[in-house]
Amino acid sequence: MTRVDAEDPQDAPALVALTELGRDAARPHSPSELDQAFNAVRARLVRGDMRRRSLRRLALIGATSTVCLVAAVKFVSVGHDRGLPPEPPVSVSRIEGGTELEGGYLSQSGVAGVKVLFNEGSTFALTAGTRGRLRSVADDGAHLAIEDGTASLAITHNRTHRWLVEAGPFLVTVKGTVFTVSWDPASERFELRLRRGHVVVTGPGVNGGISLQAGQRLVVSLPRAETVITAEQPDDTDDVLAGAAPAGSTPAAALARTAIANPIAGRPVRAAGAPVTAAKGTRTRHWAADMASGYWDRILADVDHDGVDATLESACSEDLFALAAAARYRRQGDLSRAALLAQRRRFPHAPRSLDALFLLGRAEEVREHGTEEQAIAWYDDYLAQAPRGSYAAEALGRKMLLTNAVGGPERARTVARAYLLRFPTGSYAGAARALERAP
């Protein structure tokens, strides 16, 4: 640092300037200068506060956006799982030709039957004289019942709604369909004609469930132990409830969709338009899928192609079971019985082997040279090995009817009492009570 000498004339001006600089630095600021400095500091503080508020606002907006995004994703996910957007709850709009009584029973007031119309477009029409009821109407569908007679239904398709229709001991599960269904308690005959859509029928004689496609007709006769499925012309119009024929439908067109009987083997072959199977020896069977889709004739055509004996020795357990059912639905009793016997012989410990015992009893009832005694023996074997099996009620009911046919009410009464004790509301309960009252 340069030294300043106060006595050196050359340094005197510098000393004077330094003295003035110190005096100016020590001089207090004027009020205007202080106000100006205060305003500058306050402006800086305000700008800092605004910046902090802006940052907090941006952070809050970001957090809110994140929450909304998560909620939106969850909403879309839940909406996808639950079939949202939500549909309006199902309810009865009006009833034409009758009124609803206590317990949901529909009372006819005219001569044209009763028609129930629902808010989402579905209809439930009872023909004149039919006894039916609304078991329940819920937000997601309805549970309907037919006790005697015929009804036509047109159910509006919906992703979430579930409709159930009882017809005697049978239950029809539907989504969006058009069909007619009937139940005759006197003859114990069930019939369903599916015009459009898809349904699943469960009940006695249908192997735990039959899936029907448009154009198929199912008839089940309990006394004859007979289940038959035939093909008809499907209807894609909306006027089937009025009885109108579909546009362009002709007897020839309907015939083209039915199974064609093989005049040589007496066995139905593949319907027109069905895909051709692979060559012999390279076939991959999909009979379980064919069975679920109602392609009974396709299964039987495969057997015709490969030969009955070769099929019975090469088919797996599930395929044999599907073959037995397809043959029974097409009234090929001997082939059905042969498939069931092969099931028992080749797969004695498979789950289907127990079911085969019961079905052998049914096959024995309908085959040309079958006997009631042999059918009862099959049912007894099934009840002994599967007392709580899925066919237990049906096996005991069939045994009761056959025992009555062979030995009369006195012998059948013991079976009837056993049936009522185990299955008081079963499909054979009415017959069992009648046997109890018989002289």
Image: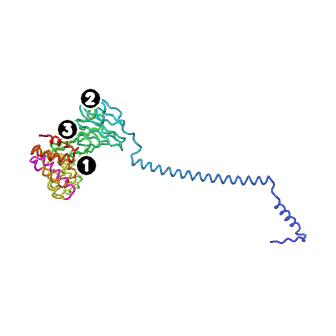
Residue 423 visible, this orientation: yes
Q: What residue type is labelled 3?
A: Pro
- Residue 344 badge: none
- Circle 3: is it few (<14), some (14-19), or many (20+) Cα within 10 Å? some
In the picture of the structure, the residue carrying the numbered disc 2 is 112
Residue 297 visible, this orientation: no
Q: Which of marks 3 and 2 is nearer the N terminus?
A: 2
Q: What element carries label 2?
A: loop
Q: Which amino acid does label 1 sit on?
A: Ala
> In the image, which residues are magenta?
349-374
Mark 1 in CB contact with mark 3 (< 8 angstroms): no
Mark in front: 1 vs 3: 3
Q: Is mark 1 on a helix, strand or loop?
A: helix
Residue sticking out furthest to the top: 110
Residue 405, by quadrant, is top left
296 part of magenta stretch: no
Closer to the camera, 326 or 111?
A: 111
Q: What residue type is labelled 2?
A: Ala
352 part of magenta stretch: yes
Q: Where residue 338 sits: x, y (%)?
A: 14, 52
In the picture of the structure, the residue carrying the numbered disc 1 is 292
